[in-house]
Amino acid sequence: MFYGEFLHTLDKKSRLIIPSRFREAIGEMGIEKLYITRGLDECLFMFSENEWKAQESKYKAMPFTKRDARRFNRLFFSGAVDVIPDKQWRVLIPDYLREYANLSKDIMVIGVSNRIEIWDKDKWEDYYKSSKEGYEEIAEKLMEF
């Protein structure tokens, strides 16, 4: 699984080097192919092939007669691209995804258990600052049993 926050840069060709800690996890899980798509909160989501299939099953089960389900699925799946890291562990971020997430040169790559998120560094810092204040309140609301 994927955990931690890592500051990285996109090179001139819009390639991202996968953090070494994530490389280890990818190697241990025997992952060859990754999927990148539009995430939420203006970031990108990156999934292993197995996790991608699990997400796909879940979203395909949503009723296509519901407008919001159709909208979500269209944006989520039309934005998806499968990538195989090169020998330097780089993956290409297509222009349309880079633009969606407003990625500049400096980016944050964060592990969120079953997925990796790719954020513009400044956007992540803003998100973190605005979210950390309510962290305990959110935990109380979500952890009530």
Image (cartoon, rainbow, N blue to C red):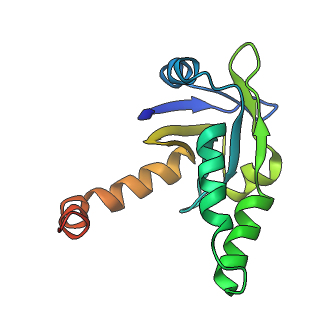
Residue 9 horizontal/vertical position (percent): 62, 31
Q: Residue at x 55, y 24 (%)?
A: 29
The x, y position of residue 58, in whole percent, is: 59, 62
Residue placed most toward the observer, 102 or 145: 145
Please tell me which residue lies in front, 100 or 54. 54
Q: Vertical placement of 127 versus 92: above or below?
A: below
Residue 11 image point, x, y percent: 73, 28
Left or right: where 23 falls relative to 131: right
Question: Which quadrant, please, contains the C terminus?
Answer: bottom left
User: Would residue 48 be visible to someone looking at this image?
Assistant: no
Farthest top residue in view? 87
Residue plotted at (17% across, 66% down): 140
Give 66 or 142, whichever is nearer the viewer. Answer: 66
In the picture, residue 38 is in which quadrant? bottom right
User: What x and y, as percent, mark residue 84?
Assistant: 76, 28
Identify the residue shown where x is 76% and y is 69%.
74
Q: Residue at x 73, y 67 (%)?
A: 75
Quadrant where the N terminus sits is top left
Residue 43 occupies quadrant? bottom right
